[in-house]
Image (spheres, grey):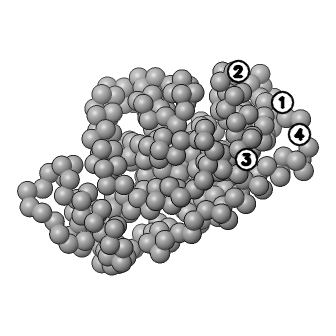
């Protein structure tokens, strides 16, 4: 799945690849091997990952899984009773929370909470900010989910997961290849070049490719893997379903630019390279909704992050 997006054909922007195949492969192998050192998935996250490919999961089944984790139960109840849902009475039952939020939204929230917990235990270089990474990932997930509710997009139920996990490869690089990560960061700043071009020059692979490779290992649905793989190059994403539907990668790419521009970037360079909101939304036919979309993002993000 994670084939190289930069291979085949020459252009003025193509990176100069001069490292041997054996050396190039070793970077990718080392990066992916670092997954063995990630904290193990919790039982809830294991169940959740498996359920993403199962459209028949029931309210009762999901509620029963949540109830096994007392911290998760408290966070779910706090979310459903937050101002975001504006309920007059207090919801004190997980089963009631599931019926109010709906399976897809609740599954998205639990995925965000569980993955954030896991990432908080990962050791990374001092120059890497896990707080900014988490903020960016959750913001992109929330906004991608908002966008697919306004657009005809393939596999919209995967928008949150794709947004949440699209930059996982960046953390993998920082964790497994800290010296190369620092070199890429300096190159991006000093040469003012897009991140993926710098990554490809140093590693002969990109964080998008590594993210997709990780999701393949985790057996997430193929449409989510594809959206992550193409989230910087959605124009190259082959349409797999209806010709009238946008690829999911288009929503993730747009969300990535918009949250970077709105102050939820992992690095200052990400903010610098973000496309203007007007340009991004014009391309989606949503040019007149920039203010509303960004306001919705901040409201929902505040409710979600207050319980993470």
Indicate which disc, 1 or 3, sits on the residue closer to the N terminus. Answer: 1
Task: From the viewer's perspective, tell me whether residue 16 is left or right of residue 165.
Answer: right
Q: On residue 191, which mark appears?
A: 2
Please report the residue visible at 31 percent of the width from the left and 55 percent of the height from the top: 307
Indicate which disc, 4 or 3, sits on the residue closer to the N terminus. Answer: 4
Q: On residue 177, which mark appears?
A: 3
Please report the residue visible at 34 percent of the width from the left and 67 percent of the height from the top: 72
CA distance separating discs 4 and 1:
9 Å
Indicate which disc, 2 or 1, sits on the residue closer to the N terminus. Answer: 1
Badge 1 crowding class, 10 Å Cα cut-off, few under 14, some 14 to 19, many 20 or more, is few
Q: Is residue 237 visible?
A: no
Give percent across and percent down for residue 192.
Answer: 66, 21
Task: From the viewer's perspective, tell me whether residue 207 is left or right of residue 11.
Answer: left
Circle 3 or circle 2, nearest the eye: 3
Please report the residue visible at 85 percent of the width from the left and 35 percent of the height from the top: 17
Q: On residue 199, which mark appears?
A: none
Give percent across and percent down for residue 38.
Answer: 61, 62
Indicate which disc, 4 or 2, sits on the residue closer to the N terminus. Answer: 4
Badge 3 crowding class, 10 Å Cα cut-off, few under 14, some 14 to 19, many 20 or more, is some
Circle 1 or circle 3, nearest the eye: 3
Residue at disc 4, secondary structure: loop
CA distance separating discs 1 and 3:
20 Å
**Height in image: 146 above or below 195?**
below
Residue corresponding to mark 1: 16
Q: On residue 19, which mark appears?
A: 4
Circle 2 or circle 1, nearest the eye: 2
Residue in front for this viewpoint, 201 or 37: 37
Residue at disc 3, secondary structure: loop
Residue 235 placement: quadrant: top right
Circles 2 and 1: CB atoms closer than 8 Å: no
Residue at disc 2, secondary structure: helix
Circles 1 and 3: CB atoms closer than 8 Å: no
């Amino acid at each position: 799945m994670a084939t190289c997006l930069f291979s085949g054909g020459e252009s003025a922007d193509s990176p100069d690849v001069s490292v041997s195949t054996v050396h190039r492969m070793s970077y990718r192998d080392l990066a992916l091997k670092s997954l063995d050192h990630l904290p193990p998935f919790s039982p809830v996250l294991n169940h959740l990952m498996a359920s993403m490919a199962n459209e028949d999961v029931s309210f009762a089944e999901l509620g029963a899984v949540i109830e096994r984790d007392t911290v998760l139960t408290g966070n779910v109840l706090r979310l459903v009773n937050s101002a975001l849902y504006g309920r007059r009475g207090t919801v004190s039952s997980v089963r009631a929370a599931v019926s109010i939020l709906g399976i897809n939204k609740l599954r998205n929230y639990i995925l965000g909470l569980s993955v954030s917990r896991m990432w908080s235990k990962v050791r990374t270089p001092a120059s890497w900010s896990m707080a900014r990474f988490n903020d960016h990932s959750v913001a992109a997930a929330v906004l991608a989910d908002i966008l697919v509710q306004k657009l005809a997009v393939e596999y919209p139920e995967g928008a949150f997961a794709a947004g949440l996990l699209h930059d996982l490869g960046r953390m993998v690089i920082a964790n497994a290849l800290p010296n190369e990560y620092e070199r890429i960061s300096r190159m991006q700043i000093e040469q003012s070049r897009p991140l993926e071009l710098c990554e490809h020059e140093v590693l002969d692979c990109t964080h998008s490719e590594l993210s997709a490779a990780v999701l393949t290992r985790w057996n997430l649905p193929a449409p989510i893997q594809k959206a992550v793989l193409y989230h910087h190059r959605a124009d190259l994403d082959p349409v797999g379903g209806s010709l009238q539907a946008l690829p999911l990668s288009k929503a993730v790419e747009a969300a990535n630019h918009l949250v970077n521009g709105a102050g939820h970037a992992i690095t200052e360079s990400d903010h610098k390279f973000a496309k203007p909101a007007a340009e991004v939304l014009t391309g989606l036919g949503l040019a007149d909704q920039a203010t509303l979309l960004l306001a919705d993002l901040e409201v929902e993000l505040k409710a979600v992050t207050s319980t993470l």
